[in-house]
Amino acid sequence: MNDDADTATRGVGVVVVAAGSGSRLGATAPKAFVPLAGRPILGHALDTVVRLPGLRSLVVVVPAELADGEASEWEGIGLPDDARVVTGGPERAESVAAGLAHVDEECDVVLVHDAARCLTPLAVFERVVEAVRAGTAGAAGAVPGMPVVDTVKTVDAQGVITGTPERAALRAVQTPQGFRRDVLVEAYRSGQVATDDAALVERMGHKVLVVEGDQLAFKVTLPADLDHAERLLATAGGRS
């Protein structure tokens, strides 16, 4: 990992979640191993993660059939020699818990990042780490987010509108989501279920701060997303 870790802190751990299927992409391979500009999506994600200042521990969570790191799908990914590869579960929360169990205990901050958000700029990672370390507003965690531009409605089971939240107070959150390691471990040991890591930490009574996200941190989910990522990588400003 990076040698420039601040000696006043204990380093950063990153869990990269890459165990999802590629069904919505219409792919036969797991999503993170689908080719993007000639390389697996996971490879592009790791290109940024390995540049994170203070990185001490990198854990990549993948489907069981790829956990040995020797399958042909790993070609072109560029997995660091000191990274840990572990088997994920059928649900994202199970995959995160599996990865978290292998993060170096000396890390004081842990980031959880979706491999599918493979073009997320390094600056977003740095903002998240800085906010967690600073404990801004008493928060134990930080997530990147973008203002919501569309009007959002809440609806009931029949699809009838029940409310219109004030758009100014809404954010579409991205990854990496970062937390104090002790807080995230506590949250995952609680046995509760949530849609993302921040929601789980919130339920434990901790504050989570939203920091500035980036349009490049979009999630590759559908074929149109993959095409968009291809176009971005084909331009000089596709990565930062």
Image (spheres, helix red, strand yellow):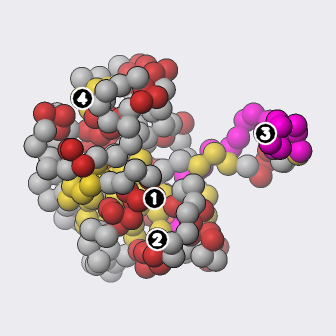
Q: Judge whether residue 148 is colored magenta.
A: yes
Check disc 2 and report the residue beneath it: 188
Closer mark to the observer between disc 2 and disc 3: 2
Check disc 1 and report the residue beneath it: 93
Secondary structure state at the residue bearing disc 2: helix
Residue type at the position of mark 3 = Val
Residue type at the position of mark 1 = Ala
- In space, the residues marked 2 and 3 are separated at their CA atoms by 30 Å
- In space, the residues marked 4 and 2 are separated at their CA atoms by 33 Å
Q: Earlier in the sequence, mark 4 or mark 2?
A: 4
Percent position of residue 108, x then y: 37, 76
- In space, the residues marked 1 and 3 are separated at their CA atoms by 26 Å
Q: Residue at x 63, y 71 (%)?
A: 203
Image vertical order of residue 99 relative to residue 18, above or below: below
- Which span of residues is magenta-colored? 141-162
Indicate left or right for 47 with 236 as reference.
left
